[in-house]
Structure formats: C-alpha cells, structure tokens
C-alpha cells in the first residue's frame, strides 16, 4: 500500500517499533521457571541494521517488560528501548523530548489498539497486516506481511527506497 500524500518521508529520522505483534507474531512461550521466549524474524533484524547504517535511529517501545526484548535490542545495537509502558503516549512524548525529535520525524509501527495514540501523532504511521481494522484505518501504510513475519523489513525497505537510500546500501553486497 502506498503512503498517504500528507506524509513527508524525507523528514523521518527515527523508526520506532512496538515489539509484541510487530517484531514478533505476538506469541509468548512461558517456560516452567517463568522465563519467556519470543520468535524474532531475522529479516527484520537485518533491515534494522541497514536502517542504522543509513544513519537513521531505531527504538523499541513495548507495553510489556521482557528480557527477550532487551536481548534482541542488544543484538541489534538498539539503545533506545522503552519497556513496561502501561501508557505508551507519555513514554513516546518523553522520548521525543530526550531525543530532540519532532513527532513528524518518527515512523511508528504498531499492531493493536494501545498503539493508536502514537499512530495518530507520528509523521508516518504503519500498521501490520494482521492489525485490527481500527488500527489499519489510522495508518499511512499497512504492510502486506503480518507482524513477526517480515513486516518490519517491508517497512524499512519501503522507506529506504522511497527516500533514495536503498541503492547505496546495496553496494556493500555487490561482488
């Protein structure tokens, strides 16, 4: 799906991602000791690293606190990780102030109703394909892929191509 005309994608400096249902399929495997496992998509991780190599910022914003999320963020060298945010909008506003960003410089990928306040506020609002209709209706872009199934990779490729950064990043893979 193409972005709505109101969006200036060249202003996007940060990609902010929900975790459960966006970077994962939303499933949780709870082990007998209380620890949990999540399934992260390797293509999403690689595109996040490409996004960072383009000089752009990436952050995670999750309503849940999870060691698995912290570990994945560490693997991907994502230093901005906000977890356990019962209300995401105040955490988002605080992040904007600390990072000295305007809301229209942020692309946000969400999947559920608690993401709506941020989706309504950012410069580029993205819903994953399997998000509820109420969420998809407020998105500038709806992915073809479900959360945890490469939706983040799709968004990053879209943004990098539209803003003319994709071809330069591909040069490192040419022989």
Image (cartoon, helix red, strand yellow):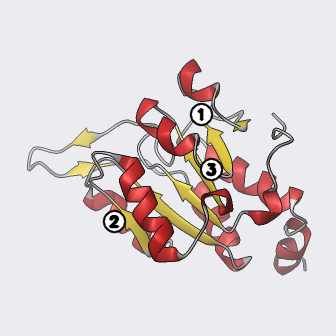
Q: Most extreme residue toward the top, as rendered?
A: 133
* Res. 44 image quadrant: bottom right
Can you see residue 77?
A: no
* Res. 98 image quadrant: bottom left
Q: Most extreme residue toward the left, as rendered?
A: 33
Residue 24: percent from the left, percent from the top?
46, 44
Callout 3 crowding tier (Cα within 10 Å): few <14, some 14–19, many ≥20: many
User: Compared with residue 3, is residue 168 higher up or lower down, i.e. above or below?
Assistant: below
Residue 1: percent from the left, percent from the top?
81, 33
- Residue at 41% x, 43% y is 20
Q: Which residue is mark 1?
A: 146
Q: Which residue is mark 2?
A: 70
Q: Which residue is mark 3?
A: 152
- Residue at 38% x, 48% y is 88
Secondary structure under tag 2 reads helix
Disc sitting over residue 93 in the figure:
none
Q: CA distance from mark 1 to mark 3?
A: 9 Å
Callout 1 crowding tier (Cα within 10 Å): few <14, some 14–19, many ≥20: many
Q: Are the two marked residues, 1 and 3, in contact with CB atoms closer than 8 angstroms?
A: no
Residue 99: percent from the left, percent from the top?
51, 75
Q: CA distance from mark 2 to mark 3?
A: 18 Å
């Amino acid at each position: 799906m193409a972005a709505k005309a109101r969006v200036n994608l060249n202003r996007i400096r940060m990609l902010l991602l929900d975790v459960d249902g966006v970077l994962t399929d939303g499933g949780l495997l709870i082990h007998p000791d209380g620890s949990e496992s999540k399934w992260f998509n390797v293509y999403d991780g690689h595109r996040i690293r490409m996004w960072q190599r383009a000089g752009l910022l990436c952050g995670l914003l999750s309503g849940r606190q999870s060691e698995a999320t912290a570990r994945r963020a560490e693997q991907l060298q994502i230093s901005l990780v906000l977890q356990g945010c019962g209300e995401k909008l105040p955490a988002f506003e605080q992040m904007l102030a600390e990072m000295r960003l305007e809301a229209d410089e942020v692309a946000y990928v969400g999947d559920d109703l608690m993401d709506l306040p941020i989706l309504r506020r950012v410069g580029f609002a993205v819903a994953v394909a399997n998000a509820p209709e109420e969420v998809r209706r407020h998105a500038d872009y709806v992915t073809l892929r479900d959360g945890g199934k490469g939706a983040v990779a799709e968004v990053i490729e879209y943004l990098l191509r539209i803003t003319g950064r994709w071809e330069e990043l591909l040069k490192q893979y040419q022989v």
